Amino acid sequence: MSLTKQIEQAESELIEKLANIEHIRWSKWQSWVHNRLQYTELIGDDGNKYAYYLMTTDDYERWERQINTDYQDLTESEKESDRREVRSYLPLLTSKITEACKEMGKYIIDTRLDDKNELHLEGIINKWFSK
């Protein structure tokens, strides 16, 4: 398999794994939100049944403020909440980075040092991409 195909396949697999993590994160969030909403059914003038979900004014105002606030301006507890979500991605990313470093290490070891014992980045890149 060509290097280009290998990169495309690895990227596609990583996207699928990250999308799965994102779906799990989103599902938990939606579940949490839905549990905070009050469900009401009403019959409209047209005779159809309509579902209404009501949230507290406090929740609405807090979420509107957060939506319109840059990350650096969030409270420390709001930032920690975002960090907690990001941590769910770390095991997969760490695994992929470790895998890439091990693979890169093979090429670094095989790359000759010049007379000043300095590695040449071009040599590493050429070895990496000529695989």
Image: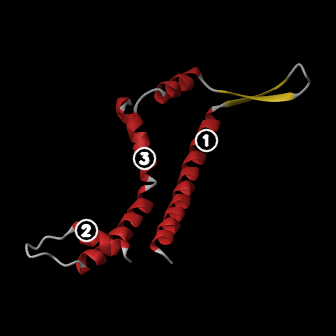
Disc 1 marks a residue whose amino acid type is Gln
- What residue is rendered at 54% in x and 49% in y? 25
Element carrying mark 1: helix
Q: Is residue 87 above or below residue 131?
A: above
Which residue is at the front of the view, 102 or 40?
102
The disc at residue 30 is 1
Quadrant for residue 69, please give it.
top left
Q: Earlier in the sequence, mark 2 or mark 1?
A: 1
Q: Which residue is mark 3?
A: 84
Q: Position of residue 55 (x, y in %)?
A: 63, 26
Nearest the eye: 103 or 58: 103
Q: Position of residue 57 (x, y in %)?
A: 58, 20
Viewer-side label of 2, 1: 2
Helix, strand or loop at label 2? It is: helix
CA neighbours of label 3 inside 10 A, class few (<14), some (14 to 19), many (20+): few
Query: In x, y percent, where is residue 46?
Result: 90, 22
Would you call the spot at circle 1 few (<14 residues within 10 Å), some (14-19), or many (20 or more)? few
Q: CA distance from mark 2 to mark 1?
A: 48 Å
Q: Earlier in the sequence, mark 1 or mark 3?
A: 1
Rendered image quadrant of residue 75: top left
| Residue where numbered disc 2 is placed | 122
- The amino acid beneath tag 2 is Glu
